[in-house]
Image (cartoon, helix red, strand yellow):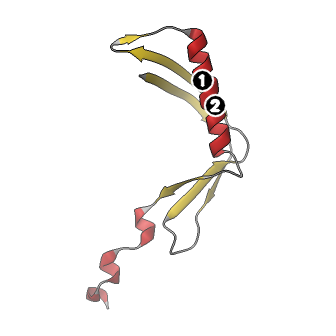
Amino acid sequence: MLNVDVTRLEGTMTVNIPPPPSDRLWYAFRTPPKLSIRSVPQVGDRSVDMSTVSSWIENKLRLLLEKNLVCPNMDDLIVPVMSGNELLKSGYNQ
C-alpha cells in the first residue's frame, strides 16, 4: 500500500464546459503545476522508511501529472446535472 499526502498543488487551470448535449467538464493545467507531495510505502500496519524509493515514487507521480494534466492533454469529469433531468423531459411538464 502507498500513502500519498498532497501538501500543495498550485497552478493556472483551464476548464472547458462544452455546450449541450455534452455532460462532461474538461480540465487541465496550462503549465506544470507546483506540487509538493510526500509518499510513504506501507506494508501491513507498518510504514516503511525508504527515502530513495519514496523519492522515486514522488518523481513518477509528478511526471504522470505533467503528462496527463498539462495542456494540450486534458482530463474530464461527467457532470450528471448537465445531461438533463428526466423529469423535465417527461410528459408532466409538457
Query: In the shown orientation, is residue 1 left or right of residue 59?
Result: left
Q: Position of residue 69 (x, y in %)?
A: 63, 45
Tell me: residue 52, above or below residue 19. above
Q: Residue furthest left?
A: 92
Q: Which residue is mark 1?
A: 58
- Residue 62, which numbered label? 2
Amino acid found under the numbered disc labelled 1: Glu
Residue lying at 72% horizontally and 47% vertically, measured from the top left: 30
Q: Secondary structure at mark 2?
A: helix
Q: Nearer the viewer, residue 77 or 35?
A: 77
Residue lying at 71% horizontally and 50% vertically, measured from the top left: 71
Q: Secondary structure at mark 1?
A: helix
Q: Would residue 77 be visible to someone looking at this image?
A: yes
Q: Position of residue 53 (x, y in %)?
A: 57, 14
Rate crowding at label 1 as few (under 14), some (14 to 19) or many (20 or more) other CA atoms within 10 Å.
some
Q: Quadrant of the N terminus?
A: top left
State if disc 1 and disc 2 touch (CB < 8 Å). yes
Q: Quadrant of the C terminus?
A: bottom left
Residue lying at 60% horizontally and 23% vertically, measured from the top left: 58
Tell me: residue 49, above or below residue 60. above
Q: Position of residue 45 (x, y in %)?
A: 33, 13
Q: CA distance from mark 2 to mark 1?
A: 6 Å
The image quadrant that residue 61 belongs to is: top right
- Residue 50, which numbered label? none
The image quadrant that residue 7 belongs to is: top right
Q: Residue furthest bottom?
A: 94
Q: Would residue 10 be visible to someone looking at this image?
A: no
Q: How many marks?
A: 2
Tell me: residue 55, above or below residue 28. above
Amino acid found under the numbered disc labelled 2: Arg
Q: Position of residue 23 (x, y in %)?
A: 48, 66
Q: Residue furthest right?
A: 31
